[in-house]
Each structure stands twice: as structure tokens, then as C-alpha cells.
């Protein structure tokens, strides 16, 4: 979501004459868009700020100016602390106020001191954002939902992103059509709890995410859809059915469970048991048998016993994941779990995380190997690392490398959905060959209007 937000900040600043730059040191403005989800992510901010300081001072010594802004959830949660530790920062803005950036930039120039805006304004920022200024590329993000009302024991999101908010269906559909017209072929819908999305449909009836996905799938030229991140409690039957109906909905779902222990799931305030998660997985696989799953796991939440950890390992074995993220529990200021006396020693957290990661790694390797020999469609995203090579994305989100057809510039093929055969599996990617590579240049290249077909 921070990638999406950063793009929108660039859109807001474009009318002022700012354009994205690859180099922070020579930029007129540097915005650090931050994440507060775990301590390690937040700490990165202060080391980045320390690196920027000499560049800002050098610019000022030459009579110039570099505006340094801190945006995102660390700004929201620790705005005053940032200004105390890094008084050379000019702007501090939370994730709900970046539509006001132009006004803040002007205020900072006038005031000559730091400007801080970490309110939760009543007017939703989406109503004030301009249309995207830059072409999105073949893969685009689209935020449809923000914030969270679930208050899991460990999580800062309800405090930093605020209350749950769903964008209206009409606004989402209009933004998706604009993205497709500008070249997007795959859209990933985003939200902290994306499947909690609910809104009024164009016909006035209440829609859930299943309905929205069906409407998005009807947009001509939109070949692929994904959505992330979901909560098991919001995985309703209509959404599950959409996985069986829509070929555009890719056969890969990220569905965090955090723990396999009911005792821990209760302590985490997740609102579901391990068996509920397993039932959802069963229903999803009944709707879409080739669905690959991803998840999130936390090792060492306060109060976690060896038996709780064993239950997590058992759940991972039972489900079998194509990939997953796992994190050591990180106490976050102001969250209930951070305040309990049941903290787990670091060494125990480290050992449990290592066990979880070894199992997930083995499952990911096995999943990638199981793709070898399959024929499937991939979305071409750009030139590969080597001459004549193309980069693509598989239906299961892995990067794919393949040799392009002779005599066709890779750039001309970006955005095409093409059939390939998977040749080899690597830890985080696949290699493949075009199925029609020997035919005339460009033959077998799915035209942008075509809809992607499921993998054989
Ligand atoms: N809304 C999603 C998760 C969003 S946060 C859900 O409810 O599942 C993304 C992931 O960060 C979480 O799934 C969790 O695994 C991890 N996470 C959040 N807070 C954490 C913390 N305090 N320590 C370690 N991991 C954390
Ligand atoms: Fe955080 Fe997800 Fe729980 Fe909301 S549902 S509090 S975003 S972990």
C-alpha cells in the first residue's frame, strides 16, 4: 500500500512541478514513506534520515533547499518523536493527509519550521486526489479499502491507518478503467483488510468484494485480478464463489492466519479458531482446486507456549503453502500485547521463527518444483536481466524469466499475456519458454483484449 500511496503523492505534487527522481541526494524534495508494522521497519527511518542530513546541509550551504518529509505510519504514530530526533525534517504527514501535501509544502516554505499534519480528516483523501499522472505499467495497485476496526492484540494498523473505510464501487471501477486505459493488465486491489470491503453498488444495493470483483472482471482488457490482504473472518461465501467463477482472478490468495493455536488466536483477538481457517481453505479449494495459498505467521506472541508453536507448525503442514511471510513478534507501542508481562525471550522467538521459516521454505521450494513442466499463461512485464530475455509474472505471483521471440523488441511485448511452459524452478522465481517461440515473431502473443485462460 505504501507503493500505491507514494505514487499518489507523486500525482498530488506533479502540478507543482515535482517529478519522481532516482537519486535522493540531488532531489529538491525527499519523502520517506514509512511503515510502523514492526520495530525494524520503523528503525530504518532514522538511519535513512541520518544519511540524508549531510546532503540537505550541503544543499543549504550552496544556497539551495531540500525539503525532507516523513510520511506514512511512523509519521502518524511518532510525529513529535521524529522532530525531536531529527529536527532538520521539514514535513511530517500521516497516511490520511497526503492529499494536503501542496498546502503543507507552501506552509513549510513560509514558516521556515516543521509542519506536522497527522489528523484523520473528515473528508476522505480519495475525494481530493487527482487522477494518476504517470502510466501505471502492466501491473497496477488500486487501494479500495483502508484502516481496520479489528484491533488484534499485536497490531498498530487501527491506530495508524484509522477506522475501516471502503471506497465506493463507482470510484473503484472508474479508477480501474483509467488504469486499464493507461496500460495496466493486472490490478491488485489493496486494503489492510481488503475483503472487509463493502460499498453501495451502482444499482444502490450493498456490494461485497465478490460483487466488486465480478464487475471489475467485466472491464475489457483487464486480464488479471488479485486482492490483498484478507482476513479469514471476512472470507464470505460469495467471495469464495468468485474464485470459482472468474478466470481473471488469479489462483493465488494471501490469507494471513498468524497462528495455528486456538489459545493464541484468542489472545490475539483474531475472532476465529484454527478449524475455521481450515474450513475456509477447504471451501476455497473446492471452488478453485488449483488455488495456491500464502499466509502470515507471528512467532513468539506474548504467552505463546511450545504447544502453541507446535500447533502453528501442524497447521502449516496441514495446509501446505506456496509461500508465506513469517515474523518474530515485535512489541508495538500502545498495543495490548506490548503491555503484557508474558513476553517471550528473544532466543525462543528466534528459534521458533527459524523452525517456521524452514518449513515454509521447504513448502515454497516444493511448490515451485511442482510447476516445472506445466503450461500456463504469464504476463510480460518488461525486459529481463540478460539481452533477449523477458521478465514476466506467473499466475502464482512468482517472477518468470524467458527468452523472447527473435527479432521482437521486449518493450513491444510488455503487457501481453502469453502461453509458456515452465522449465525450471528457482528459490524465488521460475524460468520458462514461450510455447509458440518457433512460430513467426509475435505469433502466439495473446492480444491485450484477450482474457487470460487458467493454467493447464
Ligand atoms: N490485516 C491483515 C494483516 C495486516 S498487517 C490480517 O489481519 O491478517 C501484516 C502482517 O504483519 C500481519 O499479518 C502480521 O503477521 C504482521 N504483524 C503485524 N503486527 C506485528 C507485530 N507486532 N509483530 C510481528 N508481526 C506483526
Ligand atoms: Fe492489524 Fe489485520 Fe488485525 Fe486489523 S485485522 S488489527 S490490520 S492484523
Image (tube, rainbow, N blue to C red):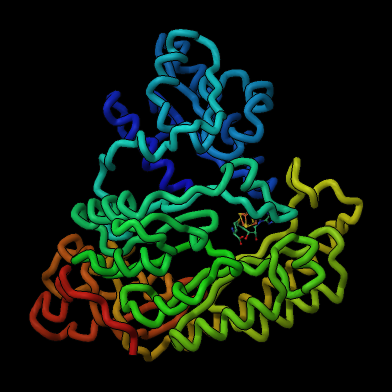
Q: Determine the residue located farthest toward the left in the rendered image.
A: 440
**Residue at horizontal 11%, vertical 79%?**
443
Extreme-front residue of the structure: 204
Instruction: Please say if 430 is above or below 164.
Output: below
Depth order, front residue of 260/418: 260
Between 288 and 254, the one nearer to me in the picture: 288
Count up the numbered dots.
0
- What percent of the width, then of the height, locates residue 299? 75, 64
Residue 103, placed above or below residue 353: above
Quick check: 16 left or right of 229? left
Question: From this viewpoint, is residue 383 visible?
Answer: no
- At a point 54% along the width and 64% down the height, the residue shown is 230
Query: Within the image, what quadrant is residue 404 found in?
Result: bottom left
Question: Which residue is located at x 40 percent, y 76 percent?
Answer: 242
Q: Quadrant of the C terminus?
A: bottom left
Q: Residue at x 43, y 12 (%)?
A: 109
Image quarter for ligand 2 equals bottom right
Judged from this view, the residue extending furthest toward the right is: 341
- Please tell me whether residue 223 is drawn above or below residue 2 in the rendered image: below
The quadrant holding residue 449 is: bottom left
Q: Is residue 438 left or right of residue 249?
A: left
Task: Indicate whether 260 appears above or below 303.
Answer: below
Q: Position of residue 349 (x, y in %)?
A: 80, 62
Note whether residue 279 is visible: yes
Spot occupied by residue 413 in the image (x, y as percentages of width and height): 18, 66
Q: Residue 400, image x and y in percent?
A: 36, 72
Question: Viewer-proximal residue, 260 or 442?
Answer: 260
* Residue 26 in which image quadrant: top left
Amino acid at each position: 500500500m505504501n507503493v500505491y500511496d507514494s505514487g499518489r503523492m507523486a500525482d498530488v505534487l506533479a502540478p507543482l512541478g515535482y517529478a519522481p527522481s532516482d537519486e535522493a541526494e540531488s532531489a529538491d524534495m525527499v519523502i520517506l514513506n514509512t511503515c510502523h508494522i514492526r520495530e525494524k521497519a520503523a528503525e530504518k527511518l532514522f538511519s535513512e534520515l541520518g544519511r540524508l542530513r549531510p546532503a540537505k546541509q550541503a544543499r543549504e550551504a550552496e544556497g539551495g533547499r531540500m525539503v525532507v518529509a516523513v510520511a506514512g505510519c511512523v509519521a502518524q504514530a511518532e510525529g513529535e518523536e521524529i522532530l525531536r530526533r531529527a529536527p532538520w525534517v521539514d514535513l511530517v504527514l500521516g497516511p490520511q493527509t497526503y492529499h494536503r501535501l501542496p498546502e503543507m509544502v507552501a506552509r513549510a516554505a513560509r514558516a521556515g519550521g516543521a509542519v506536522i499534519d497527522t489528523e484523520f480528516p473528515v473528508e476522505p483523501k480519495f475525494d481530493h486526489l487527482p487522477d494518476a499522472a504517470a502510466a501505471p505499467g502492466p501491473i497496477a495497485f488500486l487501494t479500495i479499502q483502508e484502516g481496520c476496526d479489528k484491533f488484534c492484540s499485536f497490531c498498530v494498523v487501527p491506530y495508524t491507518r484509522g477506522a475501516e473505510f471502503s471506497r465506493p464501487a463507482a470510484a473503484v471501477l472508474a479508477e480501474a478503467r483509467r488504469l486499464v486505459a493507461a496500460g495496466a493488465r493486472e490490478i491488485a486491489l489493496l486494503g489492510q483488510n481488503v475483503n472487509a470491503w463493502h460499498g453501495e453498488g451502482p444499482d444502490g444495493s450493498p456490494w461485497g468484494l465478490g460483487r466488486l470483483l465480478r464487475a471489475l472482471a467485466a472491464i475489457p482488457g483487464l486480464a488479471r485480478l488479485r486482492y490483498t490482504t484478507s482476513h479469514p473472518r471476512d472470507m464470505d461465501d460469495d467471495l469464495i464463489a468468485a474464485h470459482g467463477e472468474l478466470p481473471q482472478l488469479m489462483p493465488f490468495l494471501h490469507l494471513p492466519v498468524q497462528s495455528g493455536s486456538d489459545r493464541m488466536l484468542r489472545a490475539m483477538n483474531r475472532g476465529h479458531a484454527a478449524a475455521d481457517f481450515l474450513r475456509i481453505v477447504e471451501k476455497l479449494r473446492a471452488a478453485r482446486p488449483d488455488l495456491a495459498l500464502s499466509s502470515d505467521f507471528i512467532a513468539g506472541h506474548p504467552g505463546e507456549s511450545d504447544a502453541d508453536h507446535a500447533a502453528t507448525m501442524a497447521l502449516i503442514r496441514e495446509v501446505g503453502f506456496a509461500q508465506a511471510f513469517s515474523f518474530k513478534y515485535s512489541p508495538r507501542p500502545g498495543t495490548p500485547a506490548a503491555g503484557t508481562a508474558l513476553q517471550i525471550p528473544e532466543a525462543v522467538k528466534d528459534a521458533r521463527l527459524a523452525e517456521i521459516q524452514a518449513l515454509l521454505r521447504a513448502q515454497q521450494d516444493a511448490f515451485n518444483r511442482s510447476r516445472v513442466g506445466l503450461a500456463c499463461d504469464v504476463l510480460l512485464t518488461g525486459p529481463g536481466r540478460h539481452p533477449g530475455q523477458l521478465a514476466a509474472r506467473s499466475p502464482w505471483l512468482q517472477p518468470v524469466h524467458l527468452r523472447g521471440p527473435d527479432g521482437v523488441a521486449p518493450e513491444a511485448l510488455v503487457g501481453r499475456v502469453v502461453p509458456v511452459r515452465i522449465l525450471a524452478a528457482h528459490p524465488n522465481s521460475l524460468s520458462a519458454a514461450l510455447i509458440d517461440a518457433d512460430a513467426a515473431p509475435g505469433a502466439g502473443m495473446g492480444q491485450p483484449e484477450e482474457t487470460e485462460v487458467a493454467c493447464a
